[in-house]
Amino acid sequence: MTVTKKSLARRTFLRGLGTTLALPFLDAMTPAFANTRNAARPTRLAFVYVPNGIIMNRWTPAVEGTGFEFTPVMKALEPYREQLLVLSGLAQVNGRALGDGAGDHARAGATWLTGVHPRKTQTEIRAGVSADQIAAREFGKFTQLGSLEVGLEAPYLAGDCDSGYSCAYTNTISWRNPTTPMPTEVNPRALFERLFGDGDSTDPKVRLASFQEQASILDYVRADVARLTPGLGAGDRNKLDQYLDAIRDIERRIQKAEEQSATLKMPVMEKPAAIPEAFVDHAKLMIDLQVLAFQADLTRVISFMLAREGSNRSYREIGISDGHHSCTHHMNDPEKIDKTARINTHHVEMFAYMLDRLRSTQEGDASLLDRSLVIYGSSIADGNAHTHHDLPIALAGGGAVGVRGGRHLRFPKETPMNNLLLTVMDKAGVRIDKLGDSTGEINLLPGV
């Protein structure tokens, strides 16, 4: 048992030269938690989106219940079996045309967290309030940031991106209200500064020079760390050291990315500052920042797009030079099906990395994964046919709020995905009666 020498307020910050740095949850904060209206350790919500559908016969387990085997696309998730539910049968029927013609990718992005059929327009956009933003209204009472919207591709919100639909529908899954889409942040430097301090410029050379002139944020707060550490128990000191090491490692990786960006022999606008060239490096860096945001309780709600809907990004690091979207229109060509499945697998591997980071981060007597509910999936199932039913959905974490993993659950055909969203938010402490086309909560513990 960890011996704690002193009690700290939950919103304790390290301070120095105008910089403030939130602390992760420490054992010394337990008494502070007991004296707030948000007494229980918080539950976090994360929504991780992949576009263009999935090769469903390589995603969906053949067996329901506890005895299922992980399919090729999902194999990277096997180490997290006991903290994972595979959910089949869910639908976002408002992603269908419903008389509006083509535009399934736009409707997919707009409906995944809203369940509302979007207006087909490039200007007077309208969708619905998304689940993450409903949760953010509640959780934002207790955190510095109500939510984070994170992506890996530039979020253009204007223009026509899909058959007459505004780019807003394909480039975000988060909607503050029916007419206000939330743009994703794709630059790790900007995301870091949003969490831990503002920068002065977006020009890579200017930012690089500024970075080299400044000491690390952690150097600024070194005196505060020295003052705080002697009053902590050994366990808390170790947690604080690990937390600070993680931040310093991210600073180092961002600096490296900025150096690379500043020396690239191409126009600056084609290579934004601080974004690593490799998809894997970019994805992992953004995931690490999200985990830090949860750990420091800077936010409790995150939406994360591994790629925007309709993305035609190529994944040369796994040997695929064809665009993702192009591959999904495979017309039963075995080679294109295989390439799409390999991209699906690549995305799942990034999700597995996220689960590993959450599971390896302790908060009190549970892991951060146990204290989080993380939904992964898409609002398109078959990317070739653009179907919006029997969606590929997985739910990870939630052990601290009674979610038991290790099962493949199949729900009745056309069960609204918004029923899952209602259920997950309820378990996190956000109780609403209706979301989009929801008809009620679902049972995540059938037969129990």
Image (tube, rainbow, N blue to C red):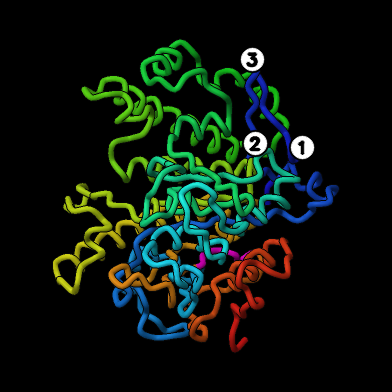
Residue found at the far bottom of this picture: 447
Asked if residue 396 lies in the magenta stretch, the reply is yes
Give the mark, 3 or 1, whose residue is nearer the N terminus. 1
| Circle 1 residue | 8
- Mark 2 lies on a secondary structure that is loop
Q: Say the numbered circle drawn on residue 23.
A: 2
Answer whether labels 2 and 3 touch (C-beta < 8 Å).
no
Task: Count neighbours of disc 1 (C-alpha within 10 A) and say few if under 14, some if 14 to 19, many if 20 or more.
Answer: some
Sooner in the amino-acid sequence: mark 2 or mark 3 = 3
Q: Name the residue under label 3.
A: 17
The x, y position of residue 255, in whole percent, is 39, 25
What is the span of residues highlighted in magenta in the rendered image?
A: 395-400
Q: Is mark 1 on a helix, strand or loop?
A: loop
Q: In which quarter of the image is residue 163?
A: bottom left
Residue 9 relative to residue 130: left or right: right
Residue type, mark 2 in image:
Leu
Question: In the image, is 252 to the left or to the right of 418?
Answer: left
Compared to residue 196, the image places residue 114 above or below, namely below
Q: How far apart are marks 3 and 1 (CA)?
A: 22 Å
Q: Earlier in the sequence, mark 1 or mark 2?
A: 1
